[in-house]
Amino acid sequence: MSFTGPKGTVHERKGILQLDGMPPSEALAGSGEVESTLVQRRDSFSAPPEQQDGMAAPSSFPSFQQSPARRPLMTRKRSGNLLAPSESSAAMPTSPVAYTELSGSMAGPAALFRIKGRRVRLSMTKGTLCWQYETAQCLGLASGPGPLRCVPLDDVLAVHHVEPTSQMPSPSSALTCCLAATCPSVMHRVVVHTIKRRSSKQCLWSLTALVLQTASAEGAAEWAASIGRAVDEAMDRPRSLLVFQNPHGGARRAAHVWKNVAAPIMHLAGIAYTVVTTTRKDHCRSFLEEHSGEELGRFDGVVAVGGDGLFQEVLNAVLTLRAAGGDKAAAAGRLRLGHIPAGSTDAVAYSLNGTRSQATAALHIALGDRAHMDVMRVDTGAGERRFCCCVAAYGYMGDLMAQSERMRCLGPSRYNLAGALTLFRNNSYRARVRYLPSTVQSYTARRVCGAHCEWCRAAGPHLRGYSHGEPHPDVFAAAAVQSPEAEPDGAWREVEGEFNAIMAVVMPCRSDRSDSGLAPFAHMADGIIHLILVRKCSALQYLRFLASIPRNGVIPEDFDYVEGIDASAVSIEPIGRESCWSVDGELLANNQVRGKVYRGLVEVFARGIET
């Protein structure tokens, strides 16, 4: 099946839509630099007059350079309360639909459709869209009904009713045998855009489509509208996003990743977005501080397109707003955070989704996935305050980051060279480590955090009172972590010695070099600082320790010079010669630090790693 659009001819082969003469991403990305884009929302049929011929930036952000007017990539048709695609949006790259086979019969009202010419009975129950092939007769041979196949509505990105056009040939011309004689000459299509999981790695997603055909225009419109309404009710999908992209992070591909990978998915989902290209340090914070709570309240989330450094900057900017109080704090408390990886390591995106795939991260955001994430507040002896979601490290990792900062001209490869130099020097540092043992119920069964983790979901009730703009009593206090001397006797424990490395790990910190992460049994919202102490050892012993991380993560029991401690707060004081602290890749000026973890302090666009 094919039809001609403004950019070429769109072909449909085996459920895959493809546009002749250009890459699939260009079919949706259009031309020109995109600084701010508004896409039709689900609750309206037409754009305001000033936006019908092009896409403009919101009037509340006059500092943006608006993009040239261009034809919107998605249009509304009066075919139910849903999005209908233009010719260019039909060219979104897809692959055969993924589904789950179930035993049993269909429940709820059903309707007859066709998939690739074969009749199917379609039904929708609460939370799922199901279909089953009917018995067919061909050349005297009967094919029995197929298994019941279902797609969760949580996995449905968008639904479109595509009306037949004069350029679309008769469906029967593409069919052979007995099916051709039974197909109507004019077919309406209901295109259900959903996700496909790679069989070898379930957490790696791609975009796919289920194409349902029927001769009834009324039936197609009604079913498309019903599916669209059910999808909207099933998930809290974002309607507007604020996107920060760092053009200098990692391999400097952030703009390319957003334009060619993420933006087409947002267009397809009907999500409005505003893109800000960072030009200086703390640009995210200054941008948010310049706008009112009412303006910020128009966004449902903030997305970082770059490396872990940009996500950490976004995190600190949002939490700083929450600390300020007032209407800005309320608006910032409702924002979910997202990370589309385009950096050197991308530990945040990998820990959230189990992969560095930019398409997977964008799909999690567009689907409106929601999960809680721990945050550690770090205070220095000089009064500096930062928020950390990955790891705060002293010793080897601090020396490595300091060395790599002097080698930025080498790009991502600088980390390998800096690591080798740091290992060769094999420095150790004396320090006094004090910690407050965690009171969180132990999970010594060593369960790896995954999708819909019960341990992390338990953070939901725990967050009432400060996850939506109402701060926890001491999250933003002048001194969240009291001096150990001010705490009751016996509450704090102390370890003093000489260490090659001290790491306070908040999340698993996975990466493509270490699928298990630094702390393989850490959870996204367990309220625990996983304190790792590597005592003074030889370079060979430390190399053995480093070599074990890609295979299993840090398992303290495997080494007699490594200690693992579950804590809720830490206080670390250097003694004598000092290293430097690296907090999520950012170096601190003062090395006397205190840290405290807050369980599930922020919400992120994620559902956990699927296995």
Image (cartoon, grey):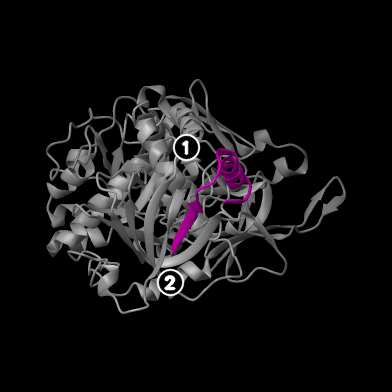
The residue at 62%/55% (across/down) is 611
Q: Is residue 406 left or right of residue 216?
A: left
Q: Which mark is residue 226?
A: none
* Amino acid bearing label 1: Ala
Of the pair 385 and 77, the residue shown nearer to us: 385
Report helix, strand or loop for mark 1. Answer: helix
3 over 58 or under it: above or below: above
Of the pair 235 and 103, the residue shown nearer to us: 235
Q: Give the Cα distance between marks 2 and 1.
A: 53 Å
Magenta stretch? 527-553
Residue 510 visible in the picture: yes
Q: Position of residue 541 (x, y in %)?
A: 59, 43
Q: Which residue is mark 2?
A: 438
The residue at 37%/75% (across/down) is 462
Q: Is residue 537 magenta?
A: yes
Q: Which residue is mark 1?
A: 90
Q: Quadrant of residue 432?
A: bottom left
Label 2 packing within 10 angstroms: few (<14), some (14-19), many (20+)? some
Q: Is residue 113 left or right of residue 421?
A: right
Q: Position of residue 14 (x, y in %)?
A: 65, 38
Q: Quadrant of residue 71?
A: top left
Sequence-first tag of 2 and 1? 1
Report helix, strand or loop for mark 2. Answer: loop
- Give the number of marks: 2
Of the pair 340 and 178, the residue shown nearer to us: 340
540 over 417 or under it: above or below: below
Q: Is residue 364 magenta?
A: no
* Amino acid bearing label 2: Ser
297 over 247 or under it: above or below: below
Of the pair 413 and 456, the residue shown nearer to us: 413
Q: Quadrant of the N terminus?
A: top right
